[in-house]
């Protein structure tokens, strides 16, 4: 089988599976609580994953790294706690048209609660953010701008530094959804100066059910907790409860202590994989664009800005039919709205087919995909 | 031909192909030949939920028989619709209501569909069954 759904979840390397298995079978003890040796070992594994993640994304301090169950939980946490601290009636949140539902719905929920509203930054025909319009969207009531580093549909590396500069010049903080971005670009949150950054373990070769929210300390300290219970407290009594310091304040309940330590081997494994995808990106972009039957969405001028993630439609052929046929040819691709309905509406389509490549995919597989796609189209049109 | 005979015929036709790709090719052929469905009847109340593709299903009673019409924007789904209509359209409501609706399992379609797609198929069958029950 040729697996081309890496953007949905990555193929985990041996070292990750080994660590994850080890934690489940040999090092099974709940973290942060007990004093016996095994509990100390599992706590050390968990906490050293925090150090590894901190170094990996260039955060200033380990207290700024919060473990969650994934990007979606990270964004829900942020939307709730940021909303409680900073958002009032009449305020505004900016999101882009290319966001995953996970970076839309939590903001809608928070805005509904707070009486705030959402403003949308559009994308152009080629899938590029309409950056010149960003500045005019920012008003004194804008509390946060939420943008994906790389859209899971368009696969374009957005200019983070530029976005952050525009927003900061207007005094507005920025949240970056790095679910896809962390896989295809080296990230440094200190350099890009974004205020919040989220990603999922399972898309970057670590265990499923793990994720990260990075936030600048000055915000995290002011924000109230998202969930209560477990080790997120300093003291509890019926006359009042005080919260633990960062990062524990945001880590209520038993976290995924078997999965989180797998961040370390995942990070080690992926650090030399960046840019190994250039040949496939060039080949796939050319192949899809030169075929008159196919429309490719997400087509930056400079191929250096394209991740190996290709969403397209075929004239006269339904995305679901194409995906079903490709499956029987031994190729796994994604089809449908891809959790980005507003973007589907933007392009006036009911869905797309997406082929997303990982470091294990070869140029031969890309060529085989194009051959099978051609056969599938001929069956349908 | 009884409903049971029509079902058996479909199962037999389907078992003629060993390869799933050939079965799809066959369904696509059926889908392309499906009787046209009026655009004006592609309304939300006729739309069936649970499919990645959209399905519209409509029925009416005529001379004591239930007549179904349906359409989809995807061809393989249209092929499946064509099979269902061949078996169920133009039968009495009680004949349909008594059926066990095992067709989809017997041709191995359910096992080969993702749960969301199978859900669409299940909703399609549920609509056929409900129409029959309402008219018995
Ligand atoms: C850009 C983007 N944001 C958010 C998510 C949600 O990630 P998860 O389902 O791991 O929470 C995804 C996953 O598809 C994504 O691609």
Image (cartoon, coloured by chain):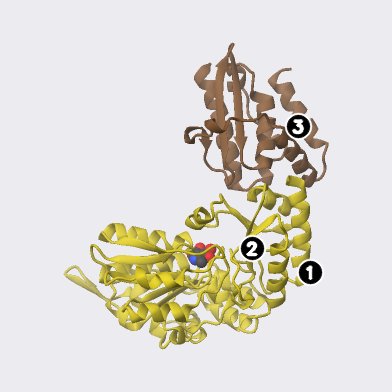
Chain colours: A yellow, B brown
- The CA distance from mark 1 to mark 2 is 17 Å
- Tell me the chain of label 1: A
Number of residues whose C-alpha sits closer than 10 Å to that of mark 3, classed few (under 14), some (14–19) or many (20 or more): some
Mark 1 and 2 residues: CB-CB less than 8 Å, in contact? no
Frontmost of labels 3 and 2 is: 2
Q: As drawn, is A31 to the left or to the right of A337? A: left
Can residue B87 be seen by looking at this rendering? Answer: yes
Mark 1 CB lies closer than 8 A to ligand 1 = no
Q: As drawn, is B93 to the left or to the right of A188? A: right
Q: As drawn, is B60 to the left or to the right of B14? A: left
Instruction: Looking at this view, name the residue that lies furthest to the top.
Output: B63
Frontmost of labels 3 and 1 is: 1
Residue at figure coordinates x 74%, y 17% from the top left: B1
Q: Which mark is residue A5?
A: 2
Residue A19: x percent and y percent? 59, 77
The residue that label 3 is drawn on is: B11
Residue placed most toward the observer, A120 or B53 = A120
Vertical comparison of A137 with B112: above or below: below
- Tell me the chain of label 3: B
Mark 1 or mark 2, which has the lower sequence index? 2
The residue that label 1 is drawn on is: A364
Q: Which mark is residue A372?
A: none
Residue at figure coordinates x 72%, y 76% from the top left: A279
SS for tag 2?
A: loop
Mark 3 CB lies closer than 8 A to ligand 1 = no
- The CA distance from mark 3 to mark 2 is 33 Å
Name which quarter of the figure residue B118 lies in.
Answer: top right
Can residue A26 be seen by looking at this rendering? Answer: no
Residue A142: x percent and y percent? 31, 70
- The CA distance from mark 3 to mark 1 is 39 Å
Frontmost of labels 1 and 2 is: 1
Residue B101: x percent and y percent? 63, 29
């Amino acid at each position: 089988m040729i697996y081309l759904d890496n953007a949905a979840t990555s193929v985990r390397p041996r070292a990750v599976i080994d660590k994850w298995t080890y934690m489940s079978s040999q090092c099974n003890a709940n973290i942060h609580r007990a004093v016996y040796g095994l509990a100390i070992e599992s706590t050390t594994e968990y906490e050293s994953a925090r150090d590894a993640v901190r170094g990996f994304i260039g955060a200033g301090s380990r207290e700024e790294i919060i473990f969650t169950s994934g990007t979606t939980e990270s964004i829900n946490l942020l939307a709730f706690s940021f909303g409680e601290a900073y958002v009032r009636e009449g305020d505004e949140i900016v999101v882009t048209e290319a966001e995953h539902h996970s970076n839309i719905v939590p903001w809608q929920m928070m805005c509904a609660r707070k009486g705030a509203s959402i403003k949308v930054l559009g994308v152009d025909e080629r899938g590029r953010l309409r950056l010149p319009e960003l500045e005019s969207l920012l008003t004194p009531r804008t509390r946060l701008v939420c943008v994906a580093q790389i859209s899971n549909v368009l696969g374009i590396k957005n200019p983070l530094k530029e976005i952050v500069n525009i927003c900061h010049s207007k005094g507005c903080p920025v949240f970056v959804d790095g679910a896809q971005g962390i896989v295809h670009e080296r990230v440094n949150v200190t350099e890009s100066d974004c205020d919040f950054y989220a990603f999922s373990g399972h898309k970057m070769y670590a265990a499923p059910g793990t994720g990260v929210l990075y936030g600048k300390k000055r915000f995290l300290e002011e924000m109230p907790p998202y969930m209560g219970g477990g080790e997120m407290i300093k003291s509890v009594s019926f006359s009042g409860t005080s919260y633990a310091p960062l990062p524990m304040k945001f880590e209520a309940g038993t976290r995924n202590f078997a999965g989180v330590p797998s961040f370390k081997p995942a990070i080690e494994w992926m650090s030399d994989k960046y840019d190994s995808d250039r040949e496939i990106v060039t080949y796939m972009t050319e192949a899809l664009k030169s075929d008159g039957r196919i429309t490719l969405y997400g087509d930056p001028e400079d191929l250096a800005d394209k991740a190996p993630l290709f969403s397209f439609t075929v004239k006269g052929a339904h995305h679901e039919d194409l995906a079903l046929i490709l499956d029987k040819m031994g190729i796994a691709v994604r089809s449908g709205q891809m959790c980005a309905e507003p973007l589907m509406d933007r392009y006036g389509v009911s869905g797309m087919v997406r082929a997303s490549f990982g470091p294990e995919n070869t140029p031969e597989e890309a060529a085989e995909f194009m051959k099978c796609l051609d056969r599938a189209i001929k069956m349908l049109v | 031909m009884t409903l049971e005979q029509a079902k058996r015929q479909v199962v037999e036709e389907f078992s003629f192909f060993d390869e799933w790709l050939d079965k799809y090719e066959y369904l696509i052929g059926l889908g392309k030949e499906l009787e046209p469905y009026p655009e004006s009847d592609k309304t939300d109340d006729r739309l069936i939920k649970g499919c990645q593709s959209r399905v519209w299903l409509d029925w009416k009673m005529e001379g004591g028989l239930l007549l179904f019409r349906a359409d989809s924007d995807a061809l393989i789904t249209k092929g499946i619709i064509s099979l269902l209509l061949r078996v169920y359209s133009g039968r009495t409501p009680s004949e349909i209501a008594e059926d066990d609706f095992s067709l989809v399992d017997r041709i191995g379609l359910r096992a080969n569909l993702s749960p969301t797609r199978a859900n669409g198929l299940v909703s399609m069958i549920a609509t056929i069954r409900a129409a029959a029950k309402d008219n018995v």
